[in-house]
Amino acid sequence: MRTWLWKHFLKAAVCSSLVLGAQTVGAQPESPAVLAKHLLSECMTRRMSVSRSLSYNDAMRACKERLQPPKDLASVSPVGTVTKGR
């Protein structure tokens, strides 16, 4: 009876550890900085593999421009503001 219980306990432990391990492997990095670094690396790898003449610095520059969020032009110069000259 004890060996039967022990075997079932081990099976349950192994199955639960496999399920938890699979969830951990597929999880996204928690830090936004880590996620941004991974995206930059993937973008650079893709660009450099497509064009062998593209330098590392050119790929980094292009990927950084691509991954930056679009700038909100309304916050830079609001519409309807008039500047007064002296």
Image: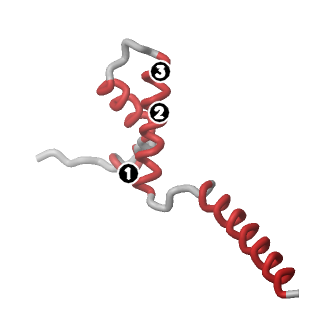
Is residue 63 placed above or below 85 in the rendered structure?
A: above
Q: Which residue is mark 3?
A: 49
How crowded is the residue under tag 1: few (<14 C-alpha within 10 Å), some, or many (20+)? few
Q: Which-is-in-front pick, marks 3 and 1?
A: 3
| Amino acid tagged 1 | Ser
Q: Which residue is mark 1?
A: 75
**Badge 3 element:** helix
Query: Which residue is nearer to you in this view: 80 or 6?
Result: 6
Pointers 3 and 1 in contact (C-beta within 8 Å): no
Q: Earlier in the sequence, mark 2 or mark 3?
A: 2
Q: Residue at x 42, y 30 (%)?
A: 44
Q: Earlier in the sequence, mark 2 or mark 1?
A: 2
Q: CA distance from mark 3 to mark 1?
A: 38 Å
Is residue 70 placed above or below 24 in the rendered structure?
A: above
**Badge 1 element:** helix
Q: Earlier in the sequence, mark 3 or mark 1?
A: 3
Q: CA distance from mark 2 to mark 3?
A: 10 Å
Residue 78 placement (x, y as % from top left): 37, 49
Q: Which-is-in-front pick, marks 2 and 1?
A: 2
| Amino acid tagged 3 | Ser
